[in-house]
Amino acid sequence: MTAQECGTRGAGRCPGARALSALLRGAGQVMFQNSPWTGLLFLCGIAWGAWSAHRPELFFGALAGLVVSTVTACLLGAPRTEIEEGLHGYNGILVGCALPVFLEGGPVCWTLIVLGSMFSAVIMMAVSRVFLSWKVSAMTGPFVFATWFVLLASYSFSAFDAVALPHPALPELPHGAPVLSSAETFFLSGLSGVSQVFLINNPVTGALFLAGLAVSSPAAAVFGWCGSLVAMAAALLLGADGASVGAGLYQFSAVLTAIGVGTTFYHPGWRAALYALLATVFTVVAQGALNAALAPVGIPTLTFPFVIAAWLFLLPHVELDAERRGDSSTSS
């Protein structure tokens, strides 16, 4: 029995267990995993990163976003199967992780977490319907759009109290040598690239995320890890800022692209691996391009490089000698 089947059987016992399973699956679906055990390890990784940074609001914000977006989808009449698979929770948990990073904690921040998570549920339903005929998932687009609207609004409403947004400025060439000092630093930065999917810079968190992937899909763990390493190598070869690469800021979107293209939307194989490699490198270039494009606006790219790369590489529906999996079992 697989971990997913075990979780499904356990969740069928009572409504409370089914609700808990749906929430845990929502956490796991951030990286395309329909497994409550993956979601549990992801939450453990977020808790560790929040505790290590002395910022518990990151963990509680993630929980709030996960619950609010799932409940909102229920109230809006989203398909029950999608809710039980966590497809209406993963954008909310990302909103809950992101807003405490950029906004001062307090009643306004928590209100915006709730509203942003609700927005993400509505946007998820809207984008999913638009993309249904194209047979492409919404990915993390709803998270990106909901968070961007809140962060951009902070320039108009002083009550939002943004404290960590990038300073609006014209893009500049990176300063300093684009290198990492040692093999150990390279390894730890690879783990940080995985942890940054949830806006956390912590190698232990990254390791817990990879463990969560391995519980559900060893192939997803391999592709996620390799995606981070490939993104680091590509960013450094292209001359990206070494400090940003070290913090995982050029890797997290590439991690999602590698997992999605390499294992979720196509069955793993050598052709899918090559296609995922190309998509991963494109994601790094898209990251740099969007960093420059959004610098004058003063908002972060979030996972939009992944969203763009995934949409562009999945819309052609290329034949890779593998059967594409149904969109109903995928997420981010």
Image: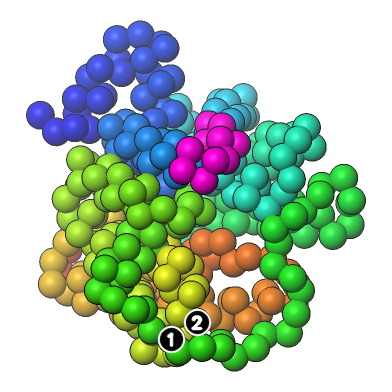
Mark earlier in primary sequence (2, 1): 1
Q: Which residue is found at the position 33% from the left and 59% from the top?
A: 191
Q: Nearer the viewer, residue 66 or 119?
A: 66
Q: Which residue is found at the position 42% from the left and 47% from the top?
A: 30
SS state under label 2: loop
From what the image shows, is residue 266 above or below residue 180? Answer: above
Kind of residue at disc 1: Pro
Distance between the Cα atoms at labels 2 and 1? 5 Å
From what the image shows, is residue 184 above or below residue 32? Answer: below
Mark 2 neighbour class, 10 Å CA radius: few under 14, some 14 to 19, many 20 or more: some
Q: Which residue is mark 1?
A: 178
Residue 10 percent location from the top left of the image: 25, 17
Mark 2 touching mark 1, by CB under 8 A? yes
Residue 100 percent location from the top left of the image: 64, 45
In this picture, which residue range is highlighted in magenta?
51-63
Q: Nearer the viewer, residue 131 or 213?
A: 213
Quadrant of the rendered structure where residue 255 is? bottom left
From what the image shows, is residue 8 above or below residue 192? Answer: above
Q: Which residue is mark 2?
A: 241
- Please indicate whether residue 1 sits to the left or right of residue 115 in the image: left
Mark 1 neighbour class, 10 Å CA radius: few under 14, some 14 to 19, many 20 or more: some
The stretch drawn in magenta includes residue 55: yes
The stretch drawn in magenta includes residue 220: no
